[in-house]
Structures are given as structure tokens and as C-alpha cells.
Amino acid sequence: MKNLRVRPLEKRDISEVKEIYILSGWSVNKGGVESWLLGGGYIKTYVAELDGKIVGKVGLDTAFPPYAEIINIVVHPDYQGRGVGSRLMEYCMQEAEKRGFWTIYLMCDPLDVGVHRFYSRFGFKPGILGDREDPRESTWLFRFGRGSFIDRFLHDHPLSEFQVSEHKVDFHGRRLYRMRWVDPVTEDRLELFLEGQPGQPDHGTMPRVSGFKYKLGEIVVEALVRETSHSISYDEPGVFLFEFENRSDDEVTLTLKPLTAPGVYIKPRPPRRLKVEAHEKLTLEFSTRLSDFFKIPVVYLSFQTVVSSLIVSVNGLNGLASAGWKFQP
């Protein structure tokens, strides 16, 4: 549709968007409507407009890099199957990636094959499977954008086979979900270990990559973060351990780079370069602190979680490890 355009939601659009929700059988409360307009630069709502009529809506949260959440794509029933949902998806992915949010995730019905087919067209893979017996325990899908270390692995290993764990698996004493890509030719592999849970329970935590494991040629390494406190506030930091194991037969060079939202700081500053001997294990302790510049409206996010991440580089090959805590205002 040539005249279809996507733009930020405006106050004058609210009544039309509410009508789309009602026609689609969705509920919308006053608090939800307010959050569409009060997210500042972190929580965006976009609408699809065709010839002056609102025909679709989507939410995009970009609070804690590199994570972006796509929320509640809804399309007017009279315009479904005409590319509106696809245009909204493409717009969100472009907006997220150009701002450096290359791990995009969303929640969907674990039984809706049509929805699965739609999201898979955009490169989404299941990371946390929902309960097939309980549709409320929805599945979390992930897409790793252009230029990410997952994208690089798949570019270098185009025949890689994907697997996802049905349940949590053990990784260095933590129970986490697992996404795994294995190249059947080279036997190289990349595994991501995810914190989170099916669906969006009140007590839940934001889905995130807690650790990774990869084998690339002769390099075999594992990395993990382990939170040692449960909450974070302006007065109390969130504390975590970073654990790294070099399972290779040779020394590797390890570099850690903080990746945080404005007003979020990791202390002490991670060392710029470390030599890790063959079969050596390394543990470092860090704290994540909030400054007065932290202005993210956490109350309007899907989860009341503050996240800080480390880009973990091993001999120039990147990985990701993220810690998260419940926010206490």
C-alpha cells in the first residue's frame, strides 16, 4: 500500500487506536493508554496510517541496550493481510537497530502457528518456550540484528542448525533457557543462556542473555553473570559476579566493555584487557549503580527490571552477558 506510513502516536490518535483494540477483541485500560504517551524517549508507540485513517499500532521499548521489546502489534480487522503488520515490524526493527538495540524480543501465543510463521519471516527464533497447556504462559522470541555477534556467527556458519531447550538447563549451577546454533560441517557452535520465564507474570524478570558458550576452531570459552543481590535502587546497587572460563588449550585475550542505559554505571570499571591462561577460570565482582540522571520510567515497562550488560570480547570475538535486578523506586 503506497500511502501507508508509520509515525509516532499522537494524542489525537487514541480514540481510533482504542477502537482497533475493541474490534480485535483486545482490552485496553486507562493506564495502558497513558503509558503510550508518557514513555519519553524509551517507550515509543507507533501507528500505521493509511489515507488519514489509523489502521494499526505497535509499541517499542528501547530502555536497556542492547535489548528492545516489540509490544502488541494490532491491526484493524478490515486491513489485516494487507502488509500493515509487516510494515510496523520493519519500522520497529529499523528504529531499534539504528539506535544500537540489536537484541529484539517479543512475546507470542505458544500455539498460534500463523503468528509463528509471521514472526519467523523477520528472523525471530524461540528462546523461552511457553506452556502449550496454558496460553497465558506465552513464548518469548528473539531476533539478533545486523552486526551482532550472533549475526556474525551465522554469516560465517551459514549451515548452522538451530535448537532451543524445552525447559531450563544447568549452566555452571544456574538454571537457564538455552538457544544453540551448531555448524554440522565445522562443529563450531554458539550457545546463549537466557534468564526469564514464559509469559509476563507480576513477579517476572526481563528476558535477557545471562551467559554464552562458544567453540570456534580451537577457541572454547564460557561466560556467565550471576546476580548476588535481588534489587536495585538509587541508594542500593545491584551486585553481580562475572565468571569466565577458558577451556581452550591456548591463552586468550579477554576484554570487557560496559553497555548500559543513561544514568546506569558499572563499578569498578572493567579491565580493558586480560590474559587468561589455558583452562583458567576467572571471577570478577561488579556493582551496577543508578545516578540522578537515571530517568527511565520503569513502571511503564513490561518488567520492573533494571539491566546492565557487558560486551565480552575474546580474541576479538564478541559475546554478551547481562545482569538484572528488580527496581525499587
Image (spheres, rainbow, N blue to C red):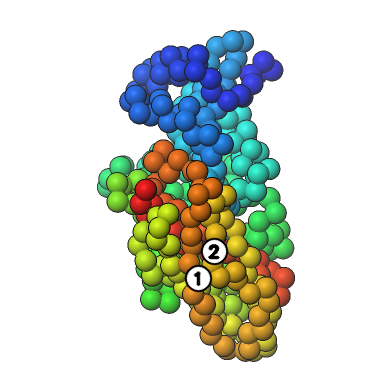
Tell me the residue at 47%/73% (across/down). 241
Tell me the residue at 48%/23% (across/down). 75
Question: Where residue 185 appears, x then y in whole percent?
Answer: 66, 70
Q: Secondary structure at mark 2?
A: strand
> Front-most of 306 and 8?
306
Tell me if residue 188 comes above or below residue 113 in the rendering. Answer: below
Counting residues from the start of the chain, the first of labels 2 and 1 encountered is: 2
Tell me the residue at 45%/40% (across/down). 297
Considering the image in quadrants, where does the N terminus appear?
Answer: top right
For the question of whether residue 283 can be seen, the reply is yes
What kind of residue is marked 1? Phe
- Are the residues tagged 2 and 1 within 8 Å (C-beta)? yes
Residue under circle 1? 286
Q: Secondary structure at mark 1?
A: strand
Please tell me in which quadrant of the rendered image residue 154 appears: bottom right
Residue under circle 2? 266
For the question of whether residue 107 can be seen, the reply is no
